[in-house]
Each structure stands twice: as C-alpha cells, then as structure tokens.
Image: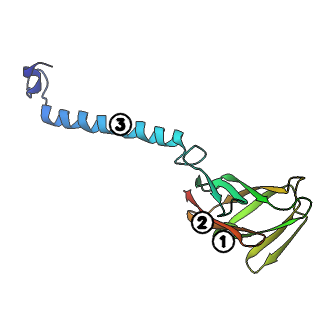
C-alpha cells in the first residue's frame, strides 16, 4: 500500500481510511479468535479430546478412575473404574458425590454382582478376574451446567475424588 492510499479521499467515493483500518484490525482479531477456538475444540477443551481425558489414582495405585474432566451438558460420558483386589474375591466399590446425584447412570458393564444404596451413595460389589482386577465401565449423562464432584471408594481405604466441568 502506498502512502497516498492511507489518506482519506473524497473523490470518486468518500472514504475514511482511519475507520477502515480499525475495521481491518477488528476483522483480523476476529479471525485469530476463531482459529484459537477451533484449536481449543480440537484439543478437547469442550469435551472428548486430549485435554479433557483424565485419570484419578489412589495413593496405593490400586484404584484408578478414568473420566472426562471437561464435557457438555446432555452428552454421554464414559468412566472406567479399575480396582486391584484379591483373585476370586469380590470387591466393594462405593460411588458418591454430586456427579452421582446430578447425573443419570445409563449403563454399567459388566453388571455388578450386587448393588445397594448407602445414604446418597451407591455400593456395588464387583467380581474380579484371575489376576484380581475388577473393571467397571459406566456411562453417565447430565443436564447440569457447572462443576460436579465424584468420589469412588473401594475396599479398605482406597479412595479417589475427581471433578467434571459441564459446559452448556
């Protein structure tokens, strides 16, 4: 752009170049903002991606919960709970927190050997494999917006807490 093109003209059309440059700057900022939003979405900031996948592990490493740290309201989220117990002996897992109260559990695979309530918590008895590992796959759906807390507790004193943020 030459120096003469930066000045406002009256003929043949009235131009306000200062205003035009502000519009161009605003347009450029808008394009950069859109690119950043797309990159954040691909990274999983709005759910289902590398930034939203998380794992909580107990201090002794025998209890692991894989979950979505970030999600959207109304979507189905998967949790995987793994407990290391004794081979052939069932383990008891307690699910508690606002996540359990505000979200609906859609599926649990494999089906627990038994389930019962304990106050506002849910007690599940899970069978173990030959190596003593019990794995439970849970899908949950929530219409809640905001942060939900979850707590999973297993046999003697193994516990993990985690939180999920749900976007509208």
Which residue appears at 9% of the width and 29% of the height? Answer: 8
Q: Counting other residues with Cα less than 10 Å from the Cα at mark 3, is it few (<14), some (14-19), or many (20 or more)?
A: few
Q: Counting other residues with Cα less than 10 Å from the Cα at mark 2, is it few (<14), some (14-19), or many (20 or more)?
A: many
How far apart are the alpha carbons under marks 1 and 2?
8 Å
Q: Secondary structure at mark 1?
A: loop
Residue 142 as seen in the image, left or right of residue 70: right
Which residue appears at 73% of the width and 77% of the height? Answer: 120
- Residue named by callout 3: 32
How far apart are the alpha carbons under marks 1 and 3?
40 Å
Q: Secondary structure at mark 2?
A: strand
- Residue named by callout 2: 148
- Residue named by callout 1: 97
Name the N-terminal-most of marks 1 and 2: 1
Q: Which mark is residue 105?
A: none
Name the N-terminal-most of marks 3 and 2: 3
Say whether residue 16 is visible: no
- Which residue, as the protein is rendered here, is positioned at the far top? 2
Q: Secondary structure at mark 3?
A: helix
Q: Are marks 1 and 2 in contact (CB under 8 Å)?
A: yes
Residue 87 placement (x, y as % from top left): 89, 58
Quadrant holding the N terminus: top left
């Amino acid at each position: 752009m030459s120096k003469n093109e930066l000045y406002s003209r009256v003929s043949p059309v009235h131009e306000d170049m200062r205003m035009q440059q502000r519009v161009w700057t605003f347009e450029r900022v808008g394009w950069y903002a859109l690119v950043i939003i797309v990159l954040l979405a691909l990274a999983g900031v709005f759910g289902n991606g590398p930034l939203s996948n998380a794992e909580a592990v107990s201090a002794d490493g025998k209890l692991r919960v894989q979950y979505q740290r970030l999600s959207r309201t109304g979507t189905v989220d998967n949790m995987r709970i793994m407990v290391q117990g004794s081979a052939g002996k069932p383990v008891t897992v307690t699910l508690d927190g606002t996540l359990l109260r505000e979200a609906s559990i859609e599926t649990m695979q494999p089906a627990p050997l038994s389930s019962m309530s304990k106050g506002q918590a849910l007690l599940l008895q899970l069978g173990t494999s030959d190596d003593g590992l019990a794995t439970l796959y849970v899908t949950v759906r929530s219409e809640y917006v905001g942060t939900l807390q979850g707590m999973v507790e297993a046999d003697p004193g193994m516990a993990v807490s985690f939180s999920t943020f749900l976007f509208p």
